[in-house]
Image (cartoon, helix red, strand yellow):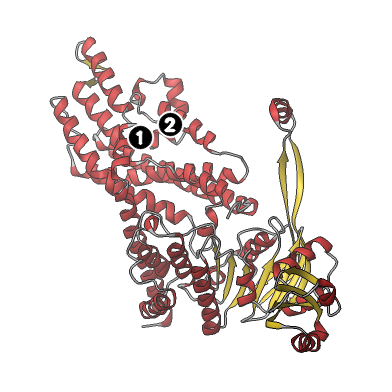
Amino acid sequence: MKPEARIELGLLENMWRKSRTMFALWFAHMTVYRAEIFIWMLSGVVPLIMMSVWIGKASANGGTLEKFDAASFAAYFLAAWVSQQLTVAWVAWEMNFQIRQGELSSRLLRPIDPLWEHVFRHFTERFVRGPFILVFVIAGTFVVPGTKLTPDVWHVLEFLLVIHLAFLIRFLMQCCVGTLSFWFENATAFDEFLYVLQTFLAGGFAPLEFYPPAIRAVVEWTPFPYMVYYPAKILTGTLTPSETWRVMLITLAWVLAFGILRSILWRFGIKKYGAVGA
Amino acid sequence: MIEVANLEKHYTVNEKEPGIAGSLRSFFSRKTKTVKAVDGVSFKIAAGEMVGFLGANGAGKTTTLKMLAGLLHPTAGTAKVAGFTPFERRSSFLKTITLVMGQKQQLLWDLPASDSFLVNQAIYEIPDLEYRATMKEFTELLDLDGILKKQVRKLSLGERMKCELAAALLHRPKVLFLDEPTIGLDVNMQVRIREFVAAYNQRFNATVILTSHYMADVTALCKRIIVVDKGHIIFDGDLSALIERSSPAKIVKLELSKVIPREILESYAPVKSLDGLFAELLVPRLETSKIAGRLLSELPVADVTIEDPDIEEIIGQLFQSQTVKS
């Protein structure tokens, strides 16, 4: 084997070893907080409440509303809820805490970008959250007769890809917010603002079909529908293949944009770090 | 191994008058002040040297260590640690150093320390064989048996500190920045940590900078000390030289077999204290043996000990005078 190939193999081995160990550590950590994660899941029930509101509206309108009947509303809002659950991120809060309290110091001393710790925390948390999501989804499909999340396994695979990208949008967006803690006393205020925007614009309140065309046109230019609305549409099989491709490319573009922004903010912000109290 | 030249770190801090009026004024116009935490510090430390970094709270010790560990970006000046510029935080630099902060922890609270060790093994890319050998060595030196599998939050402060040290040194760094590593620990545990640091220094020829409010840590480990005050170095040299320079007298402690009047004792040397049969005399360093001999032959002395003055007192005097220069 050529020396270059051996180095490459060594790098891959090291990466695999780091990933495996960090996964094991953070998974163990997250299982300690399984009850708290379940309670936290309950705080994200807006799509489930909106599901009953919209089904009620459809029933009052003779059973359908803009091509949505009770089963399709149920499918959409269940998918929206799943998307929301799988894109949950709290890294802004963590970074804010670490920067303000000096907890970032011990992370900066290690030869690995502190971002990876957050990635693994979030990734492993999904494995604890997953079984609860499954229970909710199965229960949800029984509540409204005829509800089918997806008719096709391909949609599930597409959804799995898109939801990872959607998570990265939200995660990196929050990383940017967290990095602002290098300049501001408390950057979580920005996160609260983003949360409000996301609640109204991501599609958790209503499918974008029900937004006024002018507002929808604006919303389409934001990253929010790519976190909940479009993943939900893919999971319910209501996007054409070409639309799915378009969504994937735009989602990827948002990931890249926030990734680059995070790198720039981090590079400048780290020089402002005061390592207070640590 | 460490070269620091004219290192400075200035912070901008907000100032607010107390009370509602102060809060209102601060709401519309915030007053700021520049604090010079480190102000033109220069020194060199050779490989394998152990140096005590002393100073009162807020003197600039920890800020200097943080700059040397790459956590803080200096306002001015240069620093080189093992040939690296710390703030660039290159991977190879971070594998060469460690910073242990007695008041902060890197171990995960909810999991056993052994889990954090495994993560460090992966992150620092420590081969299995080396990891096992290091763990075996540390387990013996720090008596870690039986505590590695307990949740960190269930460990005592001393046990936690031992695990913190082990985690921080697992990658066998060549440069150790130890910031109050024995804070809050009982005397036995302090001794254990000191012995461990000394053994590590010997074993790996590691360079150590130590800050501690326990002077016993410094006297036990460091031949050289650097004293900082208000961001400046006010002394850099041998601990023994500082003692000699700052306190030209030794303390001769006498236990007498019968009470002797103060005037008689004063005829030998100034009396620091006299309490019944116990007396302390401040004897000029160069005349110690001569005067001690006279005391033993001319007075009813049951026991005698000769000591250097308390190092904490000397450092205290140094802060007050700020005139001593190396």
From mark 2 to mark 1, how far is it between C-alphas? 9 Å
Nearest the viewer among B198 and B105 is B198
The structure residue drawn at horizontal position 40% and vertical position 68%, both measured from the top left corner, is B122
Q: Where is residue B244 in the image (x, y as percent from the top left)?
A: 79, 78
Q: Which amino acid does label 2 sit on?
A: Gln
Q: Do the residues labelled 2 and 1 touch (CB within 8 Å)?
A: yes
In the image, B324 versus A277, the foreground residue is B324
Chain letter for mark 2, please: A
Image quarter of the N terminus of chain B: bottom right
Give the residue type that dot 1 points to.
Answer: Val
Q: Are marks 2 and 1 on the same chain?
A: yes
Instruction: Name the chain under label 1.
Output: A
Q: Is residue B116 left or right of residue A67?
A: right
Instruction: Give the labeled residue for mark 2.
Output: A198
Q: Where is residue A136 in the image (x, y as percent from the top left)?
A: 21, 35
Q: Residues within 10 Å of mark 1 (few under 14, many from 20)?
A: many
**Do we see residue A111 in this rendering?**
yes
Mark 2 crowdedness (10 Å alpha carbons): few <14, some 14-19, many ≥20: many
Q: Name the residue under label 1.
A: A228
Above or below: residue B93 compared with residue B298:
above
Up/down of B61 relative to A88, above or below: below
Relative image position of residue B14 (x, y in whole percent): 71, 40
| Left or right: A275 in relation to A249 | right
> Image point 19% across, 24% down: which residue?
A71
User: Residue at coordinates 64% horizontally, 51% vertically from top-left?
Assistant: A272
B298 sits left or right of A139 in the view: right
Mark 1: secondary structure: loop
Total label count?
Answer: 2
Q: In which quarter of the image is residue B67?
A: bottom right
Residue A239 in sight from this viewpoint: no
Sequence-first disc among 2 and 1: 2
Give me the disc on residue A51.
Answer: none
